[in-house]
Amino acid sequence: MKIDKMLAIVAVSALAVACAPGSSEAPAAQPTGPVQTGAPAEKVTLSLVSTPESGAAIKAIIAAFQAKHPNITISYTDTNYDDYNKSLNLSLTSDQAPDIALLNSVGTTVKDGLVRSLAAYEKAYGWDKTYPSTQLAQWRVAADGSTLGSGDLYAAPAGFSLVGVYYNKAKAAKLGITVPPATLADFETALVKAKAAGELPLQLGNAQGHAAFTVQLIGQSQDGAENAAKWTFGHKGASFDTAGNRSSAQKLLDWAQKGYLPKDANGVDLQGAVTKFTQGEGVFFIDGNWDAAKIGDGLKAEAGFFAFPGAKATAIGTSVAYAISAKSKSPDAAAAFLDFLHSPEASAEEFKAGFMPADPAAAEPETGTVMADIVAAWTKVNTDDGLVGFNNNATATMNDKLTAATQELIGGKSDPAGFITAIQDEWAKTHG
């Protein structure tokens, strides 16, 4: 989740949501007994909030749901990612709290008791059998309200994001670059070859911290997905100071100094970088599938995509996921909509918008398209069990810290050791 284009995805980006000052309350008690499944028969009006990017398919999904259940009306509001994330907690505490809300990350929503545990609905609807455990893990929250990967479920997935490497097929062919590269060393050799030929090796927009994608992919390709996920999920004793992350911080600095990245990277946002890439600036571009439609439309048949190279395929990914507000007066109706998110109709709409659908059968891309490459990468990553959540979501404030720290590193105002320390110190404020 642009981290904010996902999700986020997810982008996936990450949350830096405002929360009630000084709030440290435990999550509000939630019903765990039997609940009603299926849409209620009476008339119900629900409100749903999202962002234009993560909610790219949600209007069509709402229409499909309402066609099946004309007694249920869902009002939809979207807000740009940054404003949405900053105001979400306040929105959930207000008298006009939405019934259903997009979560780009857990943030402090569970700790502050703002969203409803879905444990009873998960059991009643069988979501634990519908979705692979790894796809639900990032929305499971432990009793402390911040450690992820275990505990009650707090959001239901709609579609899934995947961050990997786009490339310009024409430029790669002209330069004699073999794609996809088999190893990180092969990828770096391709960057060297592109630079020597006068091409920009790697397009990047880092005004919103998207160099964090590069750092994470390099790091987890060496450390392995399982080890990387422990830090992202906030497991006690985990550390950002790993061999892979030390290597990734050094490479980001080296690539900036060697001219592999745009000189103005820190001043360009993600969508600005997408536009530049589609206009022919850059051989490679690390980004998520939420921008697949724009990149495919821009580069046509020359747009390609692959999972980041490593001993096993790894990727950054999360789901476009929706939670039920703790203040909702119609949680059963809201849960019926959440259950509809994995339906064939909803999955087809998510895939049209560039996300991997909850129902894999809906992923039927045209041969030779960038979406075909993305589906192949998605399959490979899942086969290798290599999907890791966004580092930016490790805490409610981590996105801000990664933005500032990567900008300082690229700008030569810090070094890899300082970068690693800054990120770990920020993580420790939440996870100890």
Image (cartoon, grey):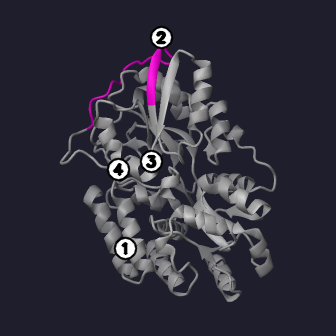
- Residue 74 in the image: above or below residue 203: above
Label 3: which secondary element: loop
Q: Answer whether residue 12 is visible to the viewer in this image.
A: no
Question: Image check: 417 left or right of 265?
Answer: left
Label 1, label 3: how far apart the Cα atoms are: 24 Å
Query: Which of the numbered marks, if any, corresponds to residue 104?
Result: 3
Residue plotted at (34% across, 50% down) = 17
Query: Which of the numbered marks, if any, corresponds to residue 352?
Result: none
Query: Which of the numbered marks, if any, corresponds to residue 420?
Result: 1
Residue that mark 2 sits on: 42
The reply to whether the magenta stretch includes residue 188 is no
Q: Which residues are magenta?
A: 27-47
Residue 301 point in image, percent of width and height:
79, 61
Label 2, label 4: how far apart the Cα atoms are: 35 Å
What's under tag 4, amino acid-wise?
A: Lys
Q: Nearer the viewer, mark 2 or mark 1?
A: 2
Quadrant assignment, res 373:
bottom right
